[in-house]
Image: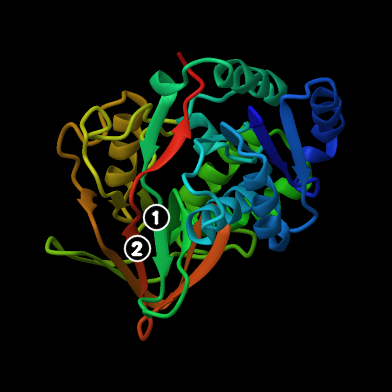
Amino acid sequence: MTLVALLSNPRSTGNQSLLPRVRSYCAANPDVFHYEVEHVDQIGAALRAIARVKPRVLVINGGDGTVQAALTELYHGGHFGEAPPVAVLPNGKTNLIAHDLGAAGDPIAALERVLALARTDMAPHIVSRELIALSSGAEDGRPVLGMFLGGAGLADAMLYCRNKIYPLGLPNGLAHAIALVVGLFSVLVGRWLRFLPLAPRPIEVSVHRQGTLEGSFAFLMVTTLQRLLLSGSMPGADKNIGSMQLLVIERSLPALLGALVAAIRGRLGRGVVRGVHLERGDEIRIAGSRSNVILDGELFEANNERPIVLRPTPPVPFLRLAA
């Protein structure tokens, strides 16, 4: 049995500078089995090989697309009799999953922490998280799995950041701040300048047995994470609540400012903010006229004829690095 299996994607942006250090660390630590893939299509073969060494922990080292593809293959592939807990190195652009699991700062330090925990009884550090299964509602399609979905104005701001700001080579924090400001401005005034993100298109969001929201929203988020960058912890994170968390913010300045202030104060969901809708559900449908949604970095399109359907999976074990 191997203590830690590390799955790396050398083509992810963060690994262009990090991977030499990762390779050196793994060469000096025989308890780490390191497998590199050149493309996400190779992740299935990688997990089959990793399953043969029976690791105590599976660590994913790559961007959002790598993490999403690995989680999808891990869940659907059946390569492990019982899947090991998963850890994610803080190596992507947003690092939301790594942040939720207490991984921050230097990825090598996080890998050292994983190896140290793998040598002990890991039970106190193993947490369960549901994944979001995204499909078109067809029974024969294989859902794509992730943990964070952005839609409406949020998706447009994420695409703007990816296509317009990241190429400038700015630090991630600064790039995200610029995208937030530009996205908010675009949502409020419309796209009257060509360099602004697209104005959000009308969508319909329905939560099973709870009702429907319709409109052009500034912000739409569905997640199974318990911690986010601004709010600290999601509403209900201290309770054993299954199902997905939906947050929708209407396209108005009071709603946006109210949600932002509540998030910064860590009180989002603990009181009523006009224009802010928080729901939990076991099935969420998103329909619209070619409206973009992004699940852990991968772009999908919601249509009126074939709405996007989100359902939670059974809990998956993850390794939390924070004490």
Disc 2 residue type?
A: Leu
- Rendering quarter of residue 88: top right
- How many numbered tags mark residues here? 2
Along the line of sight, which residue is nearer the eye, 75 or 105? 75
Q: Secondary structure at mark 2?
A: strand
Disc 2, disc 1: CB below 8 Å? yes
**Residue at 52% in and 42% down:** 181
Whole-Å distance between the Cαs marked 2 and 1? 6 Å
- Rendering quarter of residue 39: bottom right
Where residue 32 sits in the image (x, y, percent)? 72, 29
Mark with earlier residue (2, 1):
1
Q: Residues within 10 Å of mark 2 (few under 14, many from 20)?
A: many
| Vertical relation: 270 (above or below) 154 | above
Disc 1 residue type?
A: Ile
Along the line of sight, which residue is nearer the eye, 80 or 260? 80
Where residue 55 sits in the image (x, y, percent)? 61, 35
Where residue 158 sits in the image (x, y, percent)? 55, 53
Along the line of sight, which residue is nearer the eye, 233 or 217? 233
Where residue 36 sits in the image (x, y, percent)? 78, 46
Q: Secondary structure at mark 1?
A: strand
Asked whether, in this view, residue 75 is left or right of residue 248, the answer is: right
| Vertical relation: 238 (above or below) 132 | above
In the picture of the structure, the residue carrying the numbered disc 2 is 310
**Residue at 58% in and 39% down:** 94
Along the line of sight, which residue is nearer the eye, 238 or 252? 238
Q: Is residue 193 visible?
A: yes
Q: Which mark is residue 132?
A: 1
| Vertical relation: 154 (above or below) 287 | above
